[in-house]
């Protein structure tokens, strides 16, 4: 089996759940698809900006939450001003997480 990364196409909810169930992993931000991935048993590498990963991360130990800046004040305000918290996450850190799950 060849492991390839791809972006899911625009889908309806039921189609998306099927795609996620057949996926090896979900890599992306804290969104509905991340929670749907966890619900169908797909491992997640979830990227968190100002939303607290400890509050809204994927449920279960098999998931990885990456958060470089835990700015509690901004997390409560849902500020979208400069998005420094998301920008602080590096590609190298995401790649380490992917590697830790055995995908590379």
Image (spheres, rainbow, N blue to C red):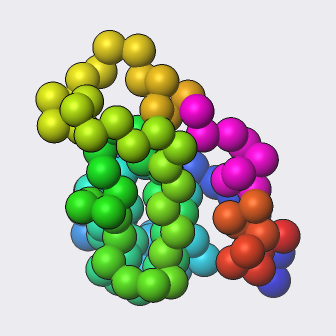
Q: Considering the image in quadrants, where does the N terminus appear?
A: bottom right
- Nearest the camera: 15 or 81? 81
Res. 3 in view: no
Task: Say left or right for 70 vs 90.
Answer: left
Residue farthest along the top direction in this orientation: 81
Q: Position of residue 22 (x, y in %)?
A: 52, 80
Q: Position of residue 30 (x, y in %)?
A: 35, 51
Q: Quadrant location of residue 78?
A: top left
Residue 92 within the magenta-colored segment of the rendering: yes
Q: What residue is at 48 percent from the left and 24 percent from the top?
A: 84
Q: What residue is at 39 percent from the left and 43 percent from the top?
A: 70
Res. 35 in view: yes
- Nearest the camera: 77 or 91? 77
Q: Position of residue 37 (x, y in %)?
A: 39, 71
- Nearest the camera: 34 or 10? 34
> Which stretch did the figure color magenta?
88-95
- Vertical placement of 29 versus 1: above or below? above
Q: How many marks?
A: 0
């Amino acid at each position: 089996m060849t492991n390839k990364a791809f972006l899911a196409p625009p889908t309806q909810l039921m189609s998306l759940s099927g795609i996620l169930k057949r996926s090896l992993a979900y890599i992306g931000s804290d969104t509905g698809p991340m929670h749907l991935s966890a619900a169908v048993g797909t491992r997640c590498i979830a990227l968190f900006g100002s939303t607290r990963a400890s509050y809204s991360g994927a449920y279960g130990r098999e998931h990885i939450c990456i958060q470089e800046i835990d700015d509690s004040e901004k997390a409560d305000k849902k500020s979208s001003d400069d998005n420094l918290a998301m920008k602080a996450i590096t590609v190298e850190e995401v790649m380490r997480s992917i590697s830790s799950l055995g995908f590379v």
